[in-house]
Amino acid sequence: MDDKESLAERLNRLAQQKRAEQDAEKQVQRTQEQVNQYILGNAKAEFENLLNVLERRVSEVNPDLRDLPRFEFGRGGPGPHMQQGNVAAYLLFYQPMLNTGPIIVRLSFGREPGGVYLDIFDSPPPEPERYEIHPAMEISPDRIIWTGDLGEISTEQLAEFVLSHLTEYYLDHKPGP
C-alpha cells in the first residue's frame, strides 16, 4: 500500500510540476507580448524624441564651437539629418509593416546632402559609416532604449554619439590640406 501511495504522490507531484511549467511558459509568452506591444506602441515616439534631443543639443552646442563648423539640423530633404561642414549624419526609422516588427533605425555618416563634388581619381570619396540599432524595452522605469551595433544605449546617449561621431567623421574627412 505504501508503494501505491508513494507512486500516486509522485504522479501527482509530476502533474503539479507540469502545470507549473505550463503556467510559467504562458506567463513568459504574455510578458514577451506585452514587451513587443510596448515597443511597437512607443518606438516611433522615442525616435521623434531622439530628433528633438538632437535639435536641442545642436542649439546648446553651436554657440560654443570654436574652430569647428556649426551643426545644422534638418528634418526634410533626405530625411532627418545633421550636417557639419562637408559631412552629415542621416537617421532613418524603418518599420516595413505597421503593428509588427522588426523596427530598424539606421545611422549613416557620409557626405552632406547638397554638395557637388569633383572627386580626383587619386582621392576617392570617404566611405560612409553605417550603424543599425533596434528599439528595446527597459523595465523600471518602462522606457525605450536602443540596442544593436552600438550596444545598449539610451536616447540621450545616442544623441551624444551622433554629435561626437559626426565631428570625428568631419575631422577625418574635412576638405583642405
Image (tube, helix red, strand yellow):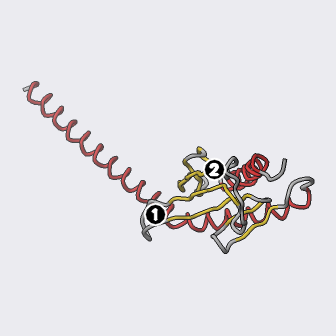
Residue at 63%, 48% in the rendered image: 153
Given this view, does label 2 or label 1 mark the residue nearer the observer? 2
Position of residue 6 in the picture relative to residue 99 (left or right): left
Pointer 2: what residue? 127
Real-space Cα separation, disc 2 to disc 1, in angstroms: 37 Å
- For the residue pair 23 and 86, the one nearer the viewer reads as 86
Please tell me which residue is depicted at 21% across the width and 36% down the height of the picture. Answer: 14
The kind of secondary structure element at disc 1 is: helix
Left or right, residue 101 beside residue 136? left
Residue 16 locus on image (x, y percent) = 24, 41
- At label 1, the amino acid type is Gln
The outermost residue toward the front is: 121
Camera-side residue of 129 and 15: 129
Q: Secondary structure at mark 2?
A: loop
Earlier sequence position, callout 2 versus callout 1: 1
Q: Position of residue 60 (x, y in %)?
A: 85, 61
Q: Is residue 79 above or below residue 124?
A: below
Residue 61, relative to residue 1: is it above or below?
A: below
Which residue has dot 1 on it?
37
Residue 10 to residue 88: above or below = above
Quarter of the image where the N terminus is located: top left
